[in-house]
Image (tube, rainbow, N blue to C red):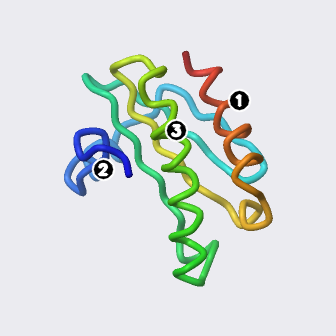
Amino acid sequence: MLKKSIRVSKNLFDEIKKTKPKLVLKTNSLSFKYYTYPSKHFAVVVSKKTISRANKRVKIKRLIKRYLQEIVNDLPSGVYIFIVTSPGILNKTYEEISTEVNSVLSKVH
């Protein structure tokens, strides 16, 4: 599990969501919105509209957060990354998701 200091609170989520992202990167199954912020934060969103079953949404969130936990120390400070999933992510394995996230995050820093 990601540390509480890195996870995003509801208030911070609402505050950041209103601002314009510095960079937006999209892949087939993920959309990344990159903002500058004083400290490191991550938000992973799996919408009910894209994946209706709760157990599948939770599984996808856990896979992405598990990978972020592994690489969190390698990322620069002052990053707020908002990750939104699409239905194409359901058929992917952990390795495929991690390579996709890694390829996009390498463009950020």
> Is residue 19 left or right of 60 when viewed as pictured?
left
Mark toward the start of the polypeptide (1 vs 3): 3
How far is the residue under mark 2 from the one under mark 3? 12 Å
Relative image position of residue 10 (x, y in whole percent): 24, 57
Residue 105 position (above or below residue 53): above
Relative image position of residue 84 (x, y in whole percent): 56, 53
Identify which residue, 51 or 65, lies in the foreground.
65
Task: Name the residue located 52 percent from the left edge and 38 percent from the top edge.
Answer: 33
Residue 48 position (above or below residue 67): below
Task: Name the residue located 55 percent from the left edge and 43 percent from the top edge.
Answer: 67
Mark toward the start of the polypeptide (1 vs 2): 2
Look at label 1 and name its amino acid.
Ser
Residue 36 position (above or below residue 92): above
Q: Which mark is residue 74?
A: none
Look at label 3 and name its amino acid.
Lys
How far is the residue under mark 1 from the one under mark 2? 24 Å
Q: The residue tagged with tag 3: helix, strand or loop? A: strand
Task: Name the residue located 60 percent from the left edge and 82 percent from the top edge.
Answer: 52
Identify which residue, 47 or 64, lies in the foreground.
64
- Tell me the residue that label 1 is attached to: 103
- The label nearer to you, 1 versus 3, is 1
- Tell me the residue that label 2 is attached to: 13
